[in-house]
Image (cartoon, coloured by chain):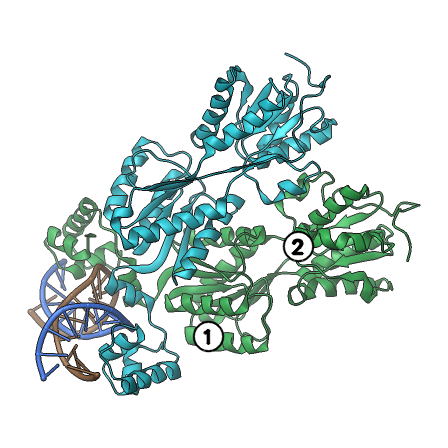
Chain colours: A green, B cyan, C blue, D brown
Amino acid sequence: MAVTLRDVARLAGVSPGAVSQVLNGKPHRISPETCEQIRQAAAQLRYVPNQNAVTLVTGQSQAMGVVIPDIRNLFFAELVSGVEAVALEAGWNIVITSSSDKSALALANFRTLAARDVGAILLVPASDADETLAMEYRQAIRDYGRPVVQVDRIIPDLGVSLTAIHQRRGAKLAMEHLLDLGHRRVACVLGPTNTCAPRLSGVQEACAQRGIALRERDLYPGAYTMESGYAVADAILEGGYTAVFCFNDMMAYGFYKRCRERGISIPHDLSVMGFDGVLFSDYLEKPLSTVWQPARQLGVEAARQAFRELECPEEAGKCTLLEPQLQIRESTAPPAAGAVCQET
Amino acid sequence: MAVTLRDVARLAGVSPGAVSQVLNGKPHRISPETCEQIRQAAAQLRYVPNQNAVTLVTGQSQAMGVVIPDIRNLFFAELVSGVEAVALEAGWNIVITSSSDKSALALANFRTLAARDVGAILLVPASDADETLAMEYRQAIRDYGRPVVQVDRIIPDLGVSLTAIHQRRGAKLAMEHLLDLGHRRVACVLGPTNTCAPRLSGVQEACAQRGIALRERDLYPGAYTMESGYAVADAILEGGYTAVFCFNDMMAYGFYKRCRERGISIPHDLSVMGFDGVLFSDYLEKPLSTVWQPARQLGVEAARQAFRELECPEEAGKCTLLEPQLQIRESTAPPAAGAVCQET
DNA sequence: TTGAAAGCGCTAACAC
DNA sequence: GTGTTAGCGCTTTCAA
């Protein structure tokens, strides 16, 4: 059915080996005329090498495996697009697997990709990864024996490179912005425990440096969804705060919605800060102040790191941290004299 | 490095063939004890079959190729997630390629996927596809010789199945909604010419059926981006309209922004209708009335169609149209008595 | 300068 | 029941 290298060889009247040499641009000990004949024959038959055969014999597919929680999350979509751009330059494809943020599935995905002999794997672990899982990952990474880059999220001691965004610093920037505006009663809406740790410690750092107390009860649980931002709003609006730091933009959107419903004016009655810098934040009725994360760049850097390791194994184990950017828009302002949110 | 089937055979003291039989659950003519031994050996060595070898010999990889314009577009991200869900059930992976909505790249991607022996290809053509390209596609599809499903966008006479959303009907619904509210001066913000044709004819149909004239100048060019919605807003706000139908939600967001800046009140001064039903539409200051497209379901159906064709080639050439849904929210209302947009 | 031959790891048809 | 064998399409080494 498909045209094979043999077909080309037959048409050109040479051996398969010769065709392989020429078409792969190897140091050719083949006469220019033969070369030309081979090229013509290949073109005529529209020969395309079977990648699986190439992979089988070379032991490495020209594909990069990617494990992410969910492609519908804009952050990961951006990330993937960065990876793809780099892969494309090198003539590689990408194989994507989503874990629904479930560790077991993420690990299974990792193994599947390994079994496909992808040339490298970019791994964004699920947020519920624990020590048992870390051990399994270590094993799987060892078995795989090729470049693995941990992206965005950290499982300790995996022994592979890490490419991530400096979230702690970003969160600190955000909190400092709020504190500098004069806010003293700030609520935080967190994400899933495992993944929001760096952001939380950024917040704590900012408070500590300014000698401001951050109470346990100022920390509200969230799930990084609009729904969870909406759901937690009432409690916060009654908590006597002058500002809220939502640990991602989505939750801030949900928060906005509830504020709108209750007639709370942002930023007059309450300042709202986000985190992510998602596409839409600039198009809200009050453009959201947030911390922009270079998601696409993250994908680019992670892919580059993988290629670097491929060229030169000593490059493994590098840690790359990208800088997030504070984006101050219209949802934050100094606390108003008579803020509507009653004191507790 | 990696454990091979031979290693397992050696440990179990049997032949490679036997191991293959047992591990693949083939009608086993193998004694239960031997079976057990083989399984144990495989488990002990943590044997994982090399997928490339399997692919090479079976001639088909357990992977579905997907060609889309851009993964950062939420619509396609949803689509892909649907495909992935179906693929996962069958133990397949997906290989994603983005074309940046460029036809040449989309075609190249198609060929790359074919060369990888993916089991089937889901193709969302780029929006600038012309007849020359259609010919190349036909050729490539023939060479590929496996199931291809055209998704969401139509290239005529490709001779493959099509799974899409009934956009014409959706657009008609939207326009009817506007007309039923009493609007007579409606502006449309289009998308790239090739891709928005069905939506446009839905609009025309609705107008024709009600004997309402749709003038050429009521059609404004757009690019399906927020920026383009923002950019076109001024012209429309001065055009004496009482309603705008943006051919996607993104452009409506951009339109909102400009309205906000100019103090135009939606829907009092102007009704705005979107198309897509993107995640955020419900969280805008005035939740956007729109036409929801079942993007994820589209992916699910397309993948299922591919699997069906794989099982039974006669299934090829089927056309599946999914129904979009009118979602009326708060951005549309009857035209106000004294609308602010001056007449032309 | 070129052809022949040996695998890569696996499946499937065929002997034993 | 189980082992042996012949490839899948390609790269690469070694002879010629």
Q: Is B187 located above or below residue A283 in the figure?
A: above
Q: How many marks do you count on the picture?
A: 2
The chain to which mark 1 is attached is A
Determine which residue is flagged by label 2.
A324
- Residue B116 picture location, percent across and down: 31, 56
Q: Is B80 located above or below residue B201 in the figure?
A: below
Q: Is A12 located above or below residue A62 in the figure?
A: above
Residue B225 lies in what quarter of the image?
top right
Whether the residues at callouts 1 and 2 have beta carbons within 8 Å, the answer is: no
Residue placed most toward the observer, B41 or A173? B41
Q: Residues within 10 Å of mark 2 (few under 14, many from 20)?
A: many
- Residue B1 picture location, percent across and down: 36, 77
Q: Residues within 10 Å of mark 1 (few under 14, many from 20)?
A: some
- Residue A290 picture location, percent across and down: 71, 49
Q: Secondary structure at mark 2?
A: loop
**Residue at horizontal 48%, vertical 22%?**
B204
* Residue type highlighted by circle 1: Ala
Determine which residue is flagged by label 1.
A140
Q: CA distance from mark 1 to mark 2?
A: 32 Å
**Residue at horizontal 87%, vertical 64%?**
A211
The chain to which mark 2 is attached is A
Residue A311 visible in the snapshot = no
Closest to the camera, between mark 1 and mark 2, is 1
Residue B228 visible in the snapshot = yes
Q: Secondary structure at mark 1?
A: helix
- Residue B254 picture location, percent across and down: 63, 34
- N-terminal label among 1 and 2: 1
- On the rendered structure, is A161 left or right of A172? left
In the rendered image, the quadrant that contains the C terminus of chain B is top right
| Discs 1 and 2 carry the same chain letter | yes
- On the rendered structure, is B26 left or right of A120? left
* Residue type highlighted by circle 2: Pro
